[in-house]
């Protein structure tokens, strides 16, 4: 993981929910790509994290390159499942 992405993950982890939502919606694409990289690490079992089967389906969407970045942004910022998954992924990004 690059140094820039580490900074974005730390910023997202330390931010309140409203600011996190704004960073995901109007921030640079690198913010969302950082979260997608975390999801890839979880999917490949490079990071040990307890996730449900339902969350695993969402991780597959984040990792899929065919899913547009705009849809990933909306999912992480607006949907309750996305916000919950984001919190779980940020725990893995320490």
Image (cartoon, rainbow, N blue to C red):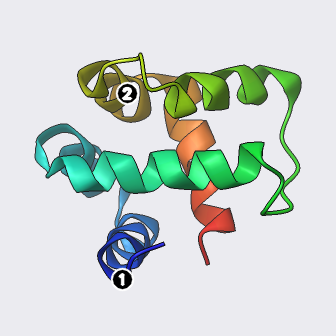
39 sits to left or right of 56: left
Q: Is 34 rendered above or below residue 6? A: above
Q: Which residue carries the number 1 mark? A: 3
Q: Quadrant of the C terminus?
A: bottom right
Residue placed at 42% from the left, 76% from the top? 6
Question: Residue 78 sits in which quadrant?
Answer: top left
* Disc 2, SS: helix
Give the residue displayed 62% in from the left and 46% down from the top: 40
Which secondary structure, mark 1?
A: helix
Q: Residue 15's spot in the image, x, y percent?
A: 35, 67
In the rendered image, residue 60, in percent from the top left (x then y), is placed at 64, 26
Nearest the viewer among 29 and 79 is 29
Label 1: few (<14), some (14–19) or many (≥20) C-alpha neighbours in 10 Å? few
- Left/right placement of residue 76 relative to residue 57 reads left
Q: Give the image location of residue 43, x and y in percent.
A: 75, 42
Label 1 vs label 2, nearer the camera: 1
Q: Which residue is mark 2?
A: 72
Residue 45 placement, left or right of 7: right
Label 2 crowd (10 A; few <14 / some 14-19 / many >=20):
many
Inter-mark Cα distance, 1 to 2: 22 Å
Is residue 66 depicted above or below 11 in this figure? above
Residue placed furthest toward the front: 65
Q: Residue at x 35, y 34 (%)?
A: 77
Q: Is residue 88 visible?
A: no
| Image quarter of residue 74 | top left
Residue 54 lies, in percent from the top left, at 78, 20
Of label 1 and label 2, which has the lower sequence position?
Answer: 1
């Amino acid at each position: 993981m690059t140094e820039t992405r580490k900074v974005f993950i730390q910023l997202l982890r330390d931010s309140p929910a409203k600011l996190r939502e704004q960073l995901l919606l109007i921030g640079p694409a690198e913010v969302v790509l950082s979260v997608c990289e975390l999801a890839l690490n979880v999917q490949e079992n490079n990071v040990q994290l307890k996730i449900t089967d339902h969350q695993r389906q969402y991780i597959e969407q984040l990792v899929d390159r065919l899913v547009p970045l705009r849809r990933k942004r909306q999912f992480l910022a607006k949907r309750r499942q996305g916000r919950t998954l984001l919190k779980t992924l940020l725990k893995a990004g320490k």
